[in-house]
Image (cartoon, helix red, strand yellow):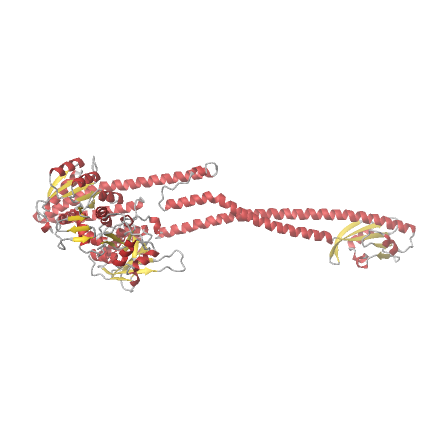
């Protein structure tokens, strides 16, 4: 599994519970990753700025500034993959976390194997190696998977890595309908219990960037009851 | 399932007695009115009759006495004269008759009207006048009509004078009056019933409203209140309304507290479990460096922590149901792909999925996560207790035309070839911490007894239900079924969309704007639970 994951991957975990932080660090280090710890939101933002980071793991419930704010703050300066850890699977927390810019979320109590799998999926798609057409054009939208470049009307569009991977997944098979389960599996590496809201929120975010009128999407369209597709 | 039936029954019963109460009020008002009307009518009739007859008797007595005087005078002047002439000469006499010397052989009787002669007189009156020599009056029936006879003894001679008057005019008048009263009574009663029914609606409106409010509270609308200001002026209703509101507030507060408690407990339990899981993972990563005894202990520990984690998750889930803190995430889901992918992804790829052909394109409005949980539970149970599932069946159930509460549903059944579930266990098996026959035995692989109870809650939340039955092919084993209401995305419109569900056609619809495209908000549970009904 770890063959496409570079050695020296650095993970920042933000968690106020020392026991969780320590055991998770131990478990992740067993995977061969380097783990940087932060126990407050402020600490996390400082550490993130100080050294390059490949994946950030943020607990929502933090003293001081909360996980959502940390997430927004990091998202403002980087498109690094962010995994949110929440004690509650309530709609509110999950959607708020995703809206704040998180790429994925996990609910406590999680099994470290699952966390590693998610991190691996994030790292994999952070370095897209998708073979395919060098240059995909859809009207005003152009996608260059190899270079990680997307332009609309010739202007570069800035996407996070997850948004980019999602767009490329759709763009490689224009006109094909992807169910949310398909996308969860291909983009996030989730199984049957994956949460469709992940896809919905990311599609919504993607539309605000690649659509001229996000309310009436012309590229990333919904196929009622089935899923999403890229309109060729 | 039982609780639901009871709820239905209670709701029906409640509605039933609402109508019953109104009808009872109307009937009571009508009955009282009827009784009063009848009594009044009877009194009126009696008094009127009495008065009319008294007046008539008085007047006929007066006239008879006057005529008797005249006859007596005539007899005194000419005792041998023609009695017939004497009687004829009486101007206002009514059917007069005369008996001279009764009881002797010289006895003579004269009547002006042979039909109403002396023979027609009642014997009692005749005896009284003739033998006791006293005047008298008597009502009787003769010739089929009511009559009154007056008899007067003539003092100077041994003779008696009688007159007979008809009373049928009084009877006719009374009959007319009686009919009028009966009609009036009937009309009054009907009017009273209508008035009672109408008035009772106003009287009962507050109760109806409280009933509706209570129902809405029961359905989870805990912020339901009745506007106190509407009833503040009413001394009888104000306390009821105030108490109701207070009760709902107390209930809401308590449920809030429970929900908060569940959430607090959730956090408290989740953190140490996260540490436990992560710590065990680290130990497991270094398993090979451990002595064999430690490895054994580690395996036992891992298995139990896994079970404990599942138990806590199930407990939290079920406590959310209990606290009313669950939210339905309705979603448009292609039914058959959902079932097949769930079966496949859970590692039951070799289990056949059979579905009604008519369901092939069905898009179901349901909470996907919960449906997957139910299926996963059924499949895993079949694996644990019955050597694995033997088949998954997706069937459409059309409503029973005789049952107005029946609706079109989808039934997903998971069959196994295990020992089956005895009749007596089939309800109990869905209770919490009940494992049917397996209860008590606690093998390494046995799950926690909350799964089926959770399945029932997941189904109920979506307006569905769960049960277990015999295998349909009659073989040994059980079929666990979840039934969900078959609601398309927009019901009828869904059919249309489905027929056009080839990607091109569907997207054409979406793009041309003929149909509203679903936004992620829609997909992510924009529908409220009540829209399910």
**Is B441 placed left or right of B246 in the picture?**
left
Which one is nearer the viewer's eye here, A205 or B377?
A205
Q: How many circles with numbers are drawn on the protein?
A: 0
> Where does the image place residue B516, in percent across and percent down from the top left?
31, 52
> Where does the image place residue A74, in percent across and percent down from the top left?
17, 40
Q: Is residue B134 visible?
A: no
Residue ID at (89%, 51%): B75
| Outermost residue to the front | A154
Residue A8 quadrant = top left
As drawn, A77 above or below B466: above
> Where does the image place residue B439, in percent across and percent down from the top left?
26, 53
Residue ID at (51%, 49%): B23
Q: Is residue B18 visible?
A: yes
As drawn, B134 above or below B413: above
Which one is nearer the viewer's eye here, B337 or B98?
B337
**Is B150 placed left or right of B295 in the picture?**
right
Which one is nearer the viewer's eye here, B486 or B403?
B486
Which one is nearer the viewer's eye here, B508 or A205?
B508
> Where does the image place residue B420, in percent across and percent down from the top left?
27, 59
């Amino acid at each position: 599994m770890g063959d496409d994951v570079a050695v020296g991957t650095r993970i920042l975990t933000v968690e106020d519970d020392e026991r969780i932080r320590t055991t998770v660090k131990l478990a992740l280090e067993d995977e061969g990753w380097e783990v940087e710890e932060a126990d407050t939101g402020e600490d996390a933002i400082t550490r993130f700025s100080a050294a390059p980071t490949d994946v950030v793991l943020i607990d929502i419930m933090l003293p001081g500034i909360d996980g959502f704010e940390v997430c927004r703050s990091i998202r403002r300066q980087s498109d690094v993959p962010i995994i949110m850890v929440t004690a509650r699977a309530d709609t509110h927390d999950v959607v708020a976390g995703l809206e704040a810019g998180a790429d994925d979320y996990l609910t406590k109590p999680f099994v470290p194997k699952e966390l590693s799998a998610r991190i691996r999926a994030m790292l994999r798609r952070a370095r897209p190696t998708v073979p395919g057409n060098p240059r995909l054009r859809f009207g005003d939208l152009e996608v260059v998977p190899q270079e990680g470049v997307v332009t609309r009307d010739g202007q570069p569009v800035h996407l996070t890595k997850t948004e980019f991977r999602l767009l490329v997944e759709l763009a490689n098979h224009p006109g094909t309908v992807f169910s949310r389960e398909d996308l969860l599996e291909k983009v996030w590496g989730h199984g049957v219990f994956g949460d469709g809201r992940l896809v919905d929120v990311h599609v919504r975010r993607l539309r605000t960037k690649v659509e001229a009128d996000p309310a009436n999407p012309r590229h990333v369209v919904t196929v009622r009851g089935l899923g999403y597709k890229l309109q060729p | 399932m039982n609780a639901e039936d009871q709820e239905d029954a209670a709701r029906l019963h409640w509605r039933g007695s609402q109508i019953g109460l109104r009808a009872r009020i109307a009937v009571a008002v009508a009955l009282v009115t009827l009784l009063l009307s009848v009594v009044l009518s009877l009194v009126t009739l009696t008094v009127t009759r009495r008065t009319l007859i008294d007046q008539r008797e008085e007047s006929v007595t007066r006239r008879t006495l006057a005529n008797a005087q005249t006859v007596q005078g005539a007899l005194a002047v000419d005792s041998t004269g023609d009695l017939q002439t004497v009687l004829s000469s009486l101007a206002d006499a009514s059917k007069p008759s005369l008996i001279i010397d009764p009881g002797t052989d010289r006895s003579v009787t004269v009547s002006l009207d042979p039909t109403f002669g002396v023979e027609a007189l009642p014997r009692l009156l005749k005896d009284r006048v003739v033998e006791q020599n006293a005047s008298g009056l008597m009502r009787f029936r003769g010739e089929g009509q009511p009559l009154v006879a007056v008899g007067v003894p003539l003092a100077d001679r041994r003779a008696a004078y009688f007159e007979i008057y008809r009373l049928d005019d009084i009877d006719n008048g009374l009959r007319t009056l009686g009919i009028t009263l009966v009609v009036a009574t009937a009309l009054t009663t009907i009017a009273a019933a209508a008035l009672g029914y109408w008035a009772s609606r106003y009287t009962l409106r507050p109760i109806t409203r409280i009933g509706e409010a209570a129902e809405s509270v029961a359905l989870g609308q805990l912020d339901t209140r009745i506007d106190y200001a509407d009833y503040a002026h009413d001394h009888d209703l104000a306390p009821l309304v105030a108490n109701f509101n207070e009760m709902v507030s107390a209930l809401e507060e308590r449920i809030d507290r429970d929900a908060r408690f569940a959430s607090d407990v959730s956090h408290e339990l989740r953190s140490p479990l996260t540490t436990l899981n992560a710590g065990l993972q680290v130990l497991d990563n270094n398993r090979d460096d451990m002595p064999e005894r430690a490895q054994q202990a580690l395996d036992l520990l891992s298995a139990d922590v896994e079970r404990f984690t599942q138990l806590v998750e199930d407990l939290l889930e079920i406590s959310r149901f209990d606290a009313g803190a669950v939210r339905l995430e309705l979603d448009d889901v292609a039914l058959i792909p959902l079932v097949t992918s769930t079966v496949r992804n859970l590692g039951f790829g070799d289990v056949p999925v059979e579905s009604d052909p008519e369901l092939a394109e069905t898009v179901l409005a349901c909470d996907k996560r919960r449906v997957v949980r139910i299926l996963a539970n059924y499949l895993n149970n079949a694996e644990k207790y019955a050597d694995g599932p033997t088949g998954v069946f997706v069937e459409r159930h059309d409503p029973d035309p005789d049952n107005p509460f029946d609706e079109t549903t989808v039934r997903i059944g998971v069959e196994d070839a295990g020992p089956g579930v005895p009749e007596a266990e089939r309800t109990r098996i869905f209770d919490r911490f009940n494992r049917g026959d397996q209860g008590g035995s606690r093998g390494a692989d046995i799950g926690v007894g909350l799964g089926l109870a959770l399945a029932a809650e997941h189904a109920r939340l979506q307006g569905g239900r769960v049960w277990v039955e015999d295998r349909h092919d009659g073989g040994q084993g059980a079929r666990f079924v979840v039934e969900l209401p078959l609601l398309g995305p927009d019901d009828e419109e869904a059919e249309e969309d489905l027929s056009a569900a080839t990607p091109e056609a569907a997207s054409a619809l979406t793009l041309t704007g003929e149909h509203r495209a679903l936004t992620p908000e829609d997909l992510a549970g924009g529908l409220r639970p009540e829209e399910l009904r």
